């Protein structure tokens, strides 16, 4: 039997003391980090606190940081963890207050689901069905990944935006919101998309850092869900925000020169229209960018338009062609979808 | 001589021109032949795909088809480019999707067959050039320096897309490069986190709190400079550093080096050639320390 050292980040609320403590445990092949914590608790120190229940990656209670990354301790084998860091470090989840040792206060995490109202809102003018509400298999296949969340909090713990902003809805709640936006049984799709676009801490505050995708033990792919929500929100016409202006500005630069145009991007993000109509907030935002731009000029970092490459002429022509083709194809799809929608409504007699 | 299809990315030809020039200088020194993809488009950086994921995919399939047509491996010099290219390459394993995308490439005589493995210069240095050769080219060892790696999200996540399992050296590529050049690589929490750049224009406060926190942490752990393979990170860490310092209310003075600048310095190239005079945070103290 091999021995393994674990360094555990501990916190004693009675004395308000934080400290690291090292333990050695005997490990059998296949033994998990959670098994090892139990061994420590039973045989070495009964005061060690952590959450657990199912021990089968179902309940979501045992997520904690192992070697700095959040994961389910019941699903993480000691051998695999030791390959990434020896001794293995174990600590509580991030972005939440620690109650004791490895136990964090999940209130803030759970509150985000309430804010996003992540439950089914059925159509009120419809009689509830005799049996269950039904969803088509093909539709479900598209978003089923987002329905497998076990609320373990691993993604929220590692989220880089939640680390600096309490107000961010965070990966899990946003993925769950996506799940209801996609569910054809849900009546609040429009309201949801509007809320998620306009709410402070909504879909446009994510940095696309992939922490949540990496951390999630259930392949919920929260960031992918957030990115799809952005596309859906734009399609639904929720375009009056910095995120969408940034996207549109970026696109227009690439369309023109084949490359991003950083010079114009701040102007476009703030909104040319808003600036021209003398919107005070917009002008203040623009002033915010000015010191940065002046610094770039001083350090000779920004090249003049003439010095900047862009794609060559041949390339630009092809890029423009592709933009046009994709646009046309999309329009075509929209027409198809509308026709399909009308057919569908007739078939179910509207709702 | 090793030859590559070279995608410089927009930032290296825009707000971070010193990355472009230092890459060319270092490549020449190492005998790498870079064939620039002059007709290629921006990767979209995950921003085009906010509203137009399909369009972004087509643009990237086109870039990869060009590299395939030249029968050359694809080299990026931006973490974000690598991430976006690799995620696209992953999607194109689906043959039906590739057929649909290829419709848009056919008019210009291109077809993407799905064989490209987009890599960062940093990986190519370790995987193709090799630690030994790099070691033998060091003229100005950086022993005096403590350097903090700053990866940029897309060179560390998602691990599946980056194929860390089959290429374990990719996991700590920056540390390896720093160490082989004689410097000491320091470890800090922020080194694999997000610099905050993508939300700079959406939520400046959050963005600069992220940048500032990582800079402050690395500085307090004794870093003389950070090294990054991502020019977007460079923008937030270098150009925005004075503002980040204000947001977190700390004094920050930490030069940020691009990967080829670091390598070039160790190989004895001149700071001017490497564009080290074009930074917002002054690099003089750092250069004095190694007698450059
Ligand atoms: S991708 Fe977005 S939601 Fe996910 S961890 Fe990063 S910032 Fe948070
Ligand atoms: S999305 Fe994944 S990581 Fe986040 S709470 Fe749900 S299961 Fe856990
Ligand atoms: S990801 Fe960055 S550097 Fe790469 S092509 Fe796009 S904007 Fe340019
Ligand atoms: S750290 Fe920020 S800018 Fe750098 S690659 Fe990640 S998301 Fe992009
Ligand atoms: S104990 Fe239930 S998920 Fe780990």
Image (cartoon, grey):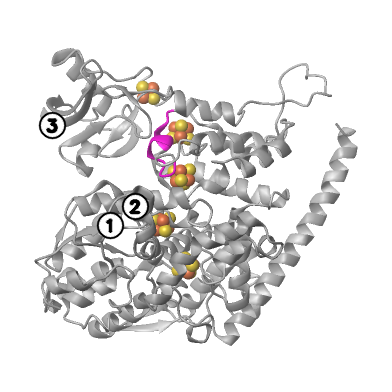
Q: Mark 2 points at which residue?
A: B212
Q: Where is residue A236 in the image (x, y as percent from the top left)?
A: 73, 48
Q: What element carries label 3?
A: strand
Quick check: do tags 1 and 3 share a chain? no
Q: Which chain carries label 2?
A: B
All told, the count of numbered labels is 3
Q: How crowded is mark 2: few (under 14 residues within 10 Å), some or many (20 or more)?
A: many
Read off the residue under disc 1: B252
Magenta range: A152-161
A221 on left or right of B276: right
- Which quarter of the image is occupied by the N terminus of chain A? top left
Residue B156 visible in rendering: no
Q: In this rendering, do the residues under marks 1 and 2 share a single chain?
A: yes
In the image, the residue with mark 3 has its CB under 8 Å from the nearest atom of ligand 5: no
Above-or-below relation of B29 to B179 = below
* Subunit bearing disc 3: A
- A326 relative to A77 in the view: left or right: right
Question: In the picture provided, is A8 more to the left or to the right than A102?
Answer: left
Q: Can residue B40 be seen in this view?
A: yes
Residue A120 in magenta stretch: no
**SS at circle 1:** loop
Labels 1 and 2 touching (C-beta < 8 A): yes
Q: Quadrant of residue B267?
A: bottom left
Alpha carbon separation for disc pair 1 and 3: 37 Å
Indicate the quadrant containing the C terminus of chain A: top left, top right, bottom left or bottom right.
top right
Q: Nearer the viewer, residue A69 or B13?
A: B13
**Residue name at image x 27 percent, y 76 percent:** B276
Residue pointed to by mark 3: A5
């Amino acid at each position: 039997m091999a021995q393994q050292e674990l360094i555990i980040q501990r916190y004693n609320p009675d004395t308000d003391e934080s400290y690291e403590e090292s333990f050695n445990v005997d490990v059998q092949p296949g033994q998990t980090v959670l098994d090892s914590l139990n061994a420590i608790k039973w045989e070495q120190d009964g005061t060690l606190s952590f959450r657990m229940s199912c021990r089968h990656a179902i309940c979501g209670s045992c997520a904690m940081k192992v070697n700095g990354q959040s994961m389910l301790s019941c699903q993480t084998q000691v051998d695999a963890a030791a390959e990434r860091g020896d001794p293995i470090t174990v600590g509580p989840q991030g972005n939440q207050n620690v109650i004791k040792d490895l136990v964090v206060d999940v209130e803030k995490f759970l509150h985000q689901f309430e804010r996003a109202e992540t439950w089914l809102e059925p159509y009120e003018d419809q009689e509830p069905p005799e049996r269950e509400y039904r969803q088509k298999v093909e539709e479900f296949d598209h978003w089923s990944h987002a329905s497998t969340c076990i609320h373990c909090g691993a993604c929220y713990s590692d989220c880089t935006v939640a680390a600096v902003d309490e107000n961010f809805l965070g990966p899990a709640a946003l993925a769950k919101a996506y799940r209801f936006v996609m569910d054809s049984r849900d009546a609040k799709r429009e309201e949801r998309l509007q809320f998620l676009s306009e709410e402070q801490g909504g879909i446009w505050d994510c940095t696309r850092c992939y922490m949540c995708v990496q951390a999630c033990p259930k392949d919920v792919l929260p960031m992918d869900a957030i990115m799809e929500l952005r596309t859906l929100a734009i399609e639904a016409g929720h375009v009056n925000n910095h995120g969408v202006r940034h996207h549109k500005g970026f696109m227009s630069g690439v369309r023109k020169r084949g490359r991003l145009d950083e010079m114009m991007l701040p102007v476009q993000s703030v909104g040319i229209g808003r600036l021209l109509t003398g919107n005070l907030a917009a002008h203040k935002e623009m002033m915010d960018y000015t010191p940065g731009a002046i610094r770039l000029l001083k350090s000779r970092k920004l090249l003049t338009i003439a010095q900047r490459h862009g794609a060559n002429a041949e390339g630009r022509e092809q890029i423009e062609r592709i933009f046009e083709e994709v646009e046309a194809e999309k329009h075509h799809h929209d027409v198809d979808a509308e026709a399909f929608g009308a057919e569908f409504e007739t078939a179910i007699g509207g709702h | 001589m090793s030859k590559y299809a070279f995608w410089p990315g927009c930032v290296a030809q825009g707000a971070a021109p010193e990355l472009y020039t230092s890459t060319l200088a270092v490549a020449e020194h190492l005998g790498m032949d870079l064939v620039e993809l002059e007709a290629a488009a921006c990767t979209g950086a995950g921003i085009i795909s906010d509203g137009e994921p399909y369009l972004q995919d087509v643009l990237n399939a086109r870039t990869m088809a060009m590299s395939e047509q030249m029968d050359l491996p694809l080299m990026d010099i931006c973490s974000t480019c690598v991430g976006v290219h690799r995620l696209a390459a992953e999607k194109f394993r689906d043959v039906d999707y590739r057929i649909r995308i290829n419709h848009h490439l056919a008019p210009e005589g291109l077809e993407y067959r799905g064989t490209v493995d987009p890599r960062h210069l940093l990986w190519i240095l370790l995987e193709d050039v090799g630690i030994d050769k790099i070691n033998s080219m060091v003229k100005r060892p950086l022993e005096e320096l403590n350097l903090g790696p700053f990866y940029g999200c897309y060179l560390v996540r998602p691990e599946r897309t980056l194929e860390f399992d089959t290429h374990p050296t990719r996991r700590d590529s920056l540390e390896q490069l720093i160490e082989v050049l004689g410097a000491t690589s320091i470890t800090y929490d922020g080194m694999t986190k997000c610099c905050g750049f993508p939300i700079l224009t959406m939520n400046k406060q959050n963005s600069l709190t992220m940048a500032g926190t990582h800079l402050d942490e690395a500085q307090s752990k004794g870093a003389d400079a950070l090294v990054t393979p991502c020019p977007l990170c460079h923008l937030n860490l270098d150009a925005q550093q004075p503002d980040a310092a204000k947001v977190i209310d700390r004094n920050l003075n930490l030069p940020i080096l691009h990967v080829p600048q670091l390598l070039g310095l160790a190989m004895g190239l001149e700071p001017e050639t490497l564009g080290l005079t074009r930074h917002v945070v002054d690099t003089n103290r750092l250069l004095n320390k190694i007698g450059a």
